[in-house]
Amino acid sequence: MGVSFFALALAVSPLLAAAETTAPVAPRGNVVDHLYGKDIPDPYRWMEGQDNKAFQDWLKAQGVVGRAWLDSAPTLAGWRTRLTAASAGSTTNRMQHRVAGRLFFLRLEQGKQGVLMQRKPDGSEMVLLDPNAVAATGGHASVTNYSVSADGLTIAVNVDHGGNEITTIEFYNTDTGARLPDQLDNIWGEFSVDWTPDGKAVTYTQMAPAGDQVDQMLNMRARYHVMGTPVTQDKTLLVSGGNPTIAIAPQEFPGVGVSADSDWVTAIIGGARAQIRTCILPRAKLLAANPTWNCLINYDDEVQGVNLKGHTFYAISKKGAPNGKLLTIDLAVSPTLDKARVLLPQSDADVLTGTNVARDALYVRYMHNGEDVFVRAPYDGGAMKAVPLPYHGAAYLTDSDPMVDGLVFTLQSWTQPRKLFAYDPARGLSDLNLGANSPKDYAAAIDILNVEAKSADGTLVPVTILQPKGYKPDGKVLSLLDAYGGYGQATQPFFDPMTLEWVMAGHVYAFVSVRGGGEKGDAWRLAGKSALKYKGVEDLIGAADYMVSHGYSRKDHVAIYGASMGGLIMGGAVAHYPDRFGAAIIHAGILNPTRLAVMPNGPNQFAETADPGTADGFTILTNMDPYLAIKPGKTWPAVMLDVGLNDNRVTPWNSGKFGAALMAAGDTKVVYRTDADSGHFGTSLSQAAAEKADHYTFLEKAMGN
C-alpha cells in the first residue's frame, strides 16, 4: 500500500508558504503494482486523481519556485521585450472560411485573444464576437472554432470560458451580430457543428453529462438540434451502446456530417489516431428510430480522410499504399468499399493528404518534401492540372463549398507569413489580403537548410535548420531541436515570429521529422508507433549528435523541445540519453503512459501507444514509459516542465510524477512553469510571447550563454 492520502495532504499543504525560497520535496509512497509478472514501483501514485488538492498544492508551490528562478535571470526582461514587440507587431488572421460571398475569420493582434470577424461582399469588415470584452470584466473567453450556415446568415461559435478547451456553442446573426437564444454546452473545443442545408438545424458532438464519469472524454455522443427549440428535445444520433447497427466504443468520438449537395449523411468515428471509421445513411432517415447505418470503412481499411459530393464518396486509403491512394464509391450503385474504384493511385514521390469538394472539381492536396501542392480533378473526367502557387510552403487551411467553384487556402513558409488565396478556373489565383503580417523581414535575416541526420539504425531523418543569415558553424551557439512524432502528423513549414526571434538572437532552431510523424507517408508513421516509439527518440538523438558533429554546438549547448505526444519523445530522450544534450523543455507531455487507463483522455491514446489492459500492451508501455525509466546514478540535463493547470488532454500529474522522479534521482535542475489561465496550450499571442520568453530564458540560464 502507499502512504495515506491524508498524511500526504498534511505533509504538502504547508509547502506553499515556503515555496518562494525552497522547492518542495515530493513525498515518496511505497506503491508497487504487480501486473503481468512485473513489479512496477510507483512512489508518486499519490499525485494522481482529479481534484487532488495535495498534488495541486505541490504543483503550484513548484510553479512559484520556478517563477522565482526565471524572474532572477537577467535575460528574462530582454526576451519579454523582444517577444512582446514581435507579438504586438503581428496581425494574424486564422480559421478563414468563405460562405455565401462572405469571408469569416479569427483576427489575432497586439497580444489579445482572437476576435471573430466577417468581411462582407462589399469589402467592409464587422466584429461578430470579441472575447477580449469578457476578459476586460475579469473573465476568460476565447474562440476555438466556428461554423457558418450555408446561407451565411447564422454562425455557431465555440467559446471557451474556462481555459480548459471545454466550450459553449453560441449562435449569432451575422447581419446584426445579435446573439440568438440557442446554446449548446459541454462541447470539446475542436468540434464545431454541422449545418443542415436549410440552416434550420445542426448536428453536434457533445461530451457526456457532467458526473457521468471521471473522464469527460469518454462516451461522447452525436446529437441533432433544431434551431429555436429547447436542447432537452435534441435527439441523440450516436452514442456508445446506442444504435446496434453502428457500434461505438466509449473512447471513440462520433460525429455526423451533412453535405449541402448530397442526400447522404456520414458518421465519422475516430479519436487520437490516424485512421477513421465511416458509416453512411440516407439523410431522410437520420431522425428515424435506430436507422440502419451502412458502415463502409473500419480502422483496418487504413482510411485517413473522406469526402462526399452528391452520391460520390471519396476516401484516402493508405492500405497497401503508404503514400495514399484516392478511392471513389458510387453510393447510388454499390455502396461498399470492395466496389471502390481507384481514382488516383499512389504517388512514389508525394504524400496524399487531403481533398476538398467544390462545385467545379475535386481539389486534391499532396505533400512534396514537406510542402503542399494542389491538383484540380474535374468531375467529368477531364485532365487533371496543378493549381499554380505563388511560392513554396504549407497550406494549413483549405476551404471549399460544394455550391461554389474553386478553393480557398492559406500558404506560408518558415520565414514568410501566411497569406490567404482563392483559386477558381475562370479567374485563376487571387490574394484575398487576409493572412498575416510580419514585424520584420525574417527571410532576409535567416537561412533555411534541409539536411538529414543518421539515427541509431542508420535511417536518415529529415532535419530543417533555421540559422542566422550567413552563419558558419563555430560551435558557439545554442541549438534548440523541436520534434513531435505522433499520429502521423507531419512537421511542415509554419511562420512563427516567436520561433524566429530565437534565431534572430543568434541561436539555431531545428525541426526534426522523427518517425511516428507523416513526413514520409504512412510507413514513416508506422515506423514510430506503439512498440516502435523508441525509434522517434533515437531519431531525435541522431539529430542532436548531428548538431554537435557538424560544429553547431557543444553537446551541453544542445536542447530539445516537445509538447503533448512529443513530450513522450522528450521524456524518453531524457531518461535514456541524458548525456547527449544539455537541456529539455517538455510542454504538457505524456510521461507516464503505463497509467493511460486512469488518465482523463487516456484510453483515447491506446491506438497510438498501447492498451495497458493487455499483457503485450502493458509491456510496450512499460518499455516506453519515461517516468518508470528514471533511475539514480546518472547525470541529468536541466529540464523545464511547462504545465497548464486547466489541461484536459494530458493530465498535469504526468509532469508532476516525472519531475519528482528526476529530482529524487540526482542533482539536476528541474523547473516547473505553471499557467493557471491555460489548458493544453495558450490561445493568445501574449500568452505565446510570455511562454517563449520563459523557455528561452530557461535555456540560456541552464546551459550558460
Image (cartoon, rainbow, N blue to C red):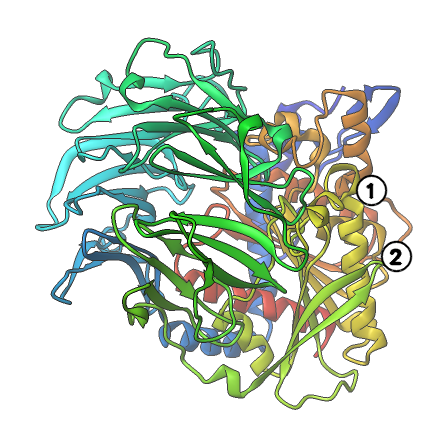
Quadrant of res 471: bottom right
Q: How many marks?
A: 2
Q: Secondary structure at mark 1?
A: helix
Location of residue 214 in the rendering, given as x and y in whole percent from the top left corner: 51, 23
Q: Please say if 126 is above or below 173.
A: below
Tell which of 20 and 456 is nearer to you. Answer: 456
Q: Please say if 213 is above or below 424.
A: above
Residue found 44% across the figure and 17% down from its top: 212
Mark 2 and 1 residues: CB-CB less than 8 Å, in contact?
A: no
Location of residue 97 in the rendering, given as x and y in whole percent from the top left corner: 30, 54
Location of residue 541 in the rendering, given as x and y in whole percent from the top left corner: 80, 60
Residue type highlighted by circle 1: Ala
Residues packed near mark 1 inside 10 Å, few (<14), some (14 to 19) or many (20 plus) = some
Looking at the rendering, in which quadrant would you find the C terminus?
bottom right
- Mark 2 → mark 1, Cα distance in angstroms: 20 Å
Residue indicated by mark 2: 456
Residue indicated by mark 1: 629
Quadrant of res 452: bottom right
Residue found 73% across the figure and 72% down from its top: 451
